[in-house]
Image (tube, grey):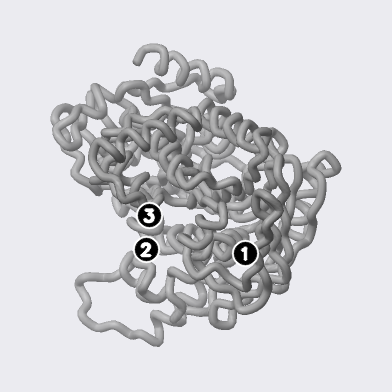
């Protein structure tokens, strides 16, 4: 099969998402689709999958046996699946309360239920070489298994074209390697994999060809072997990246202190006998493989979620700003305007009077100062790209002038330039006296930001020596994995 999108255009209000974009992918290749947040990558793939209708252009699929299908748009994802296209979205789409087999059956449109659906699902996961506990409920699965389920759902209708939007964002390094190996095998068997990612190292590990979008137009397309990280970065942002050596803040007074702290969540012990400090002016990174207590620890510091202290003490200076892992469900209300979303995070509950003109002016100022690309204060949060949503969440957090900043994967899913901007904002907040504690599933992100690193291992905190290397962090994580 061959996928060809010709002169695709799409607007959201006054924002040009795609302007005459052409893209093609051929059997046997992994094709990387790159660009800044808001460049149009997800929109283009959503059009290919029938989730969004373009205003102009043509979609062509050369099917098996030489049958060609050409249409201005697919009316729905079901039509796209019937044409041989499957998609793995940026955020998990499975229903947590359903089992693995029920989710596969729902996406594929099977009429079978119960044991018959389980047998059919088991056959598919065996054929794909992606083992899953068919009868397990999705809410009990790890992030890696949930991502695996998303791929199985996408391929359950025998799709030959697989579109993936930031599929490695929630995966540990070893899990990323396994996914990229699967994509190479899928392409080697004659399939097409289109990979949206911001991680250039992944691109050079797995891709055959690359297309770059910038502000809704194609700036580069061709064979990856002819490119360099520098040429791709230049195509994405239109200029060379300046990467000055970051200035580290000087640690001050203790802002977060845990002493022999033990935490539970849902009745399960998550953090065990942890003792550590975070001082104003320093950035402490938390490295951990999913499910080892980092979520509960950070949320206890932030004062959110149903985390319960069962032993020890935790003292945190306020105010505290929290950057949650899932911006779309925990940080923003997509149907609300940007002004309303910013108000929700900064509202002074002692006042009953709202000056909406001032709120809109303040929102516009924040949009400009944080380079948030949006139609204006009245635009819905849902109209922003993922990266611009994250910048909005961070701008709102900093507006409170917090003494402590707690961040879960603060630059996950961001392009190079946006990630640099967020990281510099975090460093600036530390230089201005904030204490920052952050977790990233990407070890390189932890090293890029942190002055000190804590490793969580089955709920136990290990404080690593000053300036740890990637290898030292990896060894600590591997020791944890071996102990499980």
Which residue in the protein does label 2 denote?
332
Mark seen at residue 40:
1
Estimate how packed mark 2 is, as few (under 14), some (14 to 19) or many (20 or more) residues with alpha carbons within 10 Å: many
- Indicate which disc, 3 or 1, sits on the residue closer to the N terminus: 1
In this picture, residue 461 sits left or right of residue 418: left
Image x and y of residue 118, in percent: 30, 36
Q: Residue at x 37, y 54 (%)?
A: 402
**Could you say which is closer to the camera, residue 377 or residue 333?**
333
Instruction: Answer above or below: position of 458 versus 33.
Output: above
Image x and y of residue 189, in percent: 65, 34
Of labels 1 and 2, the one closer to you: 1
Instruction: Answer above or below: position of 258 versus 479.
Output: below
SS state under label 2:
loop
Instruction: Answer above or below: position of 391 versus 147.
Output: below
Of labels 2 and 3, the one closer to you: 2
SS state under label 3:
loop
- Indicate which disc, 2 or 3, sits on the residue closer to the N terminus: 2
In this picture, residue 62 sits left or right of residue 78: right
Q: Residue at x 24, y 23 (%)?
A: 272
Label pair 3/1, CB-CB below 8 angstroms = no
Q: Residue at x 40, y 76 (%)?
A: 337
Residue 277 is at least partly visible in this image: no
Which residue in the protein does label 3 denote?
402
Marks 3/1: CA–CA distance = 34 Å
**Could you say which is closer to the camera, residue 434 or residue 296?**
296
Label pair 2/3, CB-CB below 8 angstroms = no
- Indicate which disc, 1 or 2, sits on the residue closer to the N terminus: 1
SS state under label 1:
loop
Residue 216 is at least partly visible in this image: yes
Image x and y of residue 203, in percent: 68, 40
Marks 1/2: CA–CA distance = 21 Å
């Amino acid at each position: 099969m061959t996928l060809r999108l010709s002169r695709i255009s799409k607007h959201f209000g006054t924002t040009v998402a795609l302007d005459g974009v052409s893209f093609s992918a051929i059997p046997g290749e992994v094709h990387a689709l790159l660009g800044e947040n808001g460049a149009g990558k997800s929109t283009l793939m959503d059009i290919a999958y029938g989730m969004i209708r373009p205003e102009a252009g043509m979609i062509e699929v050369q099917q098996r046996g030489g049958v060609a299908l050409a249409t201005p748009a697919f009316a729905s994802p079901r039509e796209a699946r019937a044409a041989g296209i499957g998609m793995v979205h940026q955020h998990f789409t499975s229903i947590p309360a359903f089992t693995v087999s029920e989710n596969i059956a729902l996406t594929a449109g099977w009429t079978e239920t119960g044991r018959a659906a389980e047998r059919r699902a088991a056959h598919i996961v065996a054929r794909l070489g992606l083992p899953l506990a068919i009868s397990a409920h999705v809410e009990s699965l790890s992030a890696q298994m949930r991502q695996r389920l998303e791929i199985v759902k996408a391929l359950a209708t025998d799709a030959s074209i697989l579109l993936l939007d930031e599929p490695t964002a929630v995966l540990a390094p070893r899990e990323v390697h396994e996914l990229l190996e699967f994509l190479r095998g899928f392409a080697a068997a004659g399939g097409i994999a289109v990979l949206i990612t911001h991680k250039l190292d992944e691109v050079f590990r797995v891709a055959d060809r690359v297309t770059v979008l910038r502000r809704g137009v194609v700036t580069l397309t061709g064979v990856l072997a002819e490119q360099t990280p520098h040429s791709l970065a230049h195509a994405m942002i239109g200029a060379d990246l300046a990467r000055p050596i970051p200035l580290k803040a000087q640690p001050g007074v203790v802002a977060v202190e845990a002493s022999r702290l033990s935490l539970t969540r849902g009745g399960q012990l998550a953090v065990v006998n942890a003792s550590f400090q975070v001082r104003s002016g320093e950035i402490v990174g938390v490295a951990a493989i999913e499910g080892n207590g980092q979520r509960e620890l950070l949320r206890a510091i932030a004062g959110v979620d149903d985390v319960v202290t069962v032993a020890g003490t935790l003292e945190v200076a306020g105010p505290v700003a929290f950057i949650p892992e899932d911006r779309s469900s925990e940080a923003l209300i997509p149907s609300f305007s940007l002004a309303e979303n910013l108000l929700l995070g900064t509202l002074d509950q002692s006042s009953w009077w709202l000056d909406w003109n001032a709120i809109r002016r303040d929102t516009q100022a924040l949009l400009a100062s944080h380079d948030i690309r949006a139609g204006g204060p009245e635009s819905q949060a849902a109209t922003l790209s993922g990266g611009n949503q994250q910048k909005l969440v961070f701008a709102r957090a900093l507006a409170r002038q917090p003494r402590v900043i707690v961040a879960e994967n603060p630059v996950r899913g961001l392009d190079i330039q946006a990630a640099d901007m967020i990281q510099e904002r975090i460093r600036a907040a530390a230089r201005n006296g904030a204490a920052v504690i952050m977790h990233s599933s990407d070890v390189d992100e932890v090293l890029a930001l942190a002055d000190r690193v804590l490793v969580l291992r089955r709920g136990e905190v290990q404080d690593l020596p000053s300036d740890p290397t990637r290898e030292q962090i990896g060894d600590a994580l591997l020791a944890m994995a071996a102990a499980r």
